[in-house]
Image (cartoon, grey):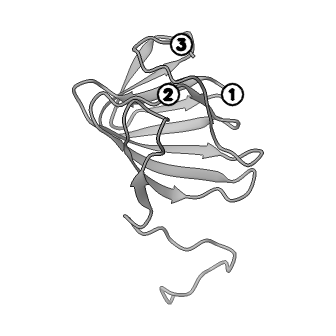
Amino acid sequence: MNRQQATNPNSPPMHRAGSATSRSPEGIASAPFWLETLVEAKEDGELAAMCCSLEPGTVTHWHTHPLGQILYALSGVGMVQRQGGAIEEMRAGDCVTFAPGEAHRHGAAPSSTFAYISIQGRENGSAVTWLRAEIETGGEP
């Protein structure tokens, strides 16, 4: 099969590493981090996927996803916390799922970088809702 030939003309092209890397938007974490859009959700019901790389101690603000979220740890040591729950450690190969609308946050442990892939669905034009900017360990939204 010719490498240029697509099996489905409606399929998006292959994502090439490094082709969609940027800094995170301001105000979504305790510090900026790198993110690479792997799959962009252009329509409601589609999935979006990102690869994120955080410096030690960088933690997202509390947020929810309308269709839930899957996080898969690639490297380093990370932390996740659900609203009202304890902080849980994540290491490479660990995977966590958040339910639709479940308030949570995630980030790098204080002494380690953390890289992960996140997958979330889009609904009503958005894949995430950011809540109050609580960055203190144990802070609730």
Return the disc, 2 or 1, that comes first in the chain's sequence. 2
Q: Which residue is mark 2?
A: 61
**Residue under pointer 3:** 140
Q: Is residue 52 above or below residue 99?
A: below
Q: Which residue is mark 1?
A: 101
Out of 86 and 92, give the one closest to the viewer.
86
**Residue at 48% across, 67% down:** 15
Distance from label 2 to label 3 (Cα)?
10 Å
Q: How far is disc 3 from disc 1 in space, using C-alphas?
A: 15 Å
What is the three-letter code of the residue carrying label 2?
His
On the image, the x and y values in percent for residue 96 come to 50, 30
Would you say residue 74 is visible in this rendering? yes
Farthest left residue in view = 111
Above-or-below relation of 52 to 137: below
Numbered badge on residue 25: none
Task: Work out whether mark 2 precedes mark 3 in sequence or the reverse, and give the earlier one.
Answer: 2
Q: Say which label, 3 or 1, has the lower sequence index.
A: 1
- At a point 21% along the width and 26% down the height, the residue shown is 111
Residue 31 place in picture, x, y as percent: 36, 35
- Where disc 2 sits, the SS reads loop
Q: Amino acid at mark 1?
A: Gly
What residue type is disc 3 on?
Glu
- Are there few (<14), some (14-19), or many (20+) residues within 10 Å of tag 2? many
The span from disc 2 to disc 1 (Cα, nearest Å) is 15 Å
Q: Position of residue 22 (x, y in %)?
A: 41, 55
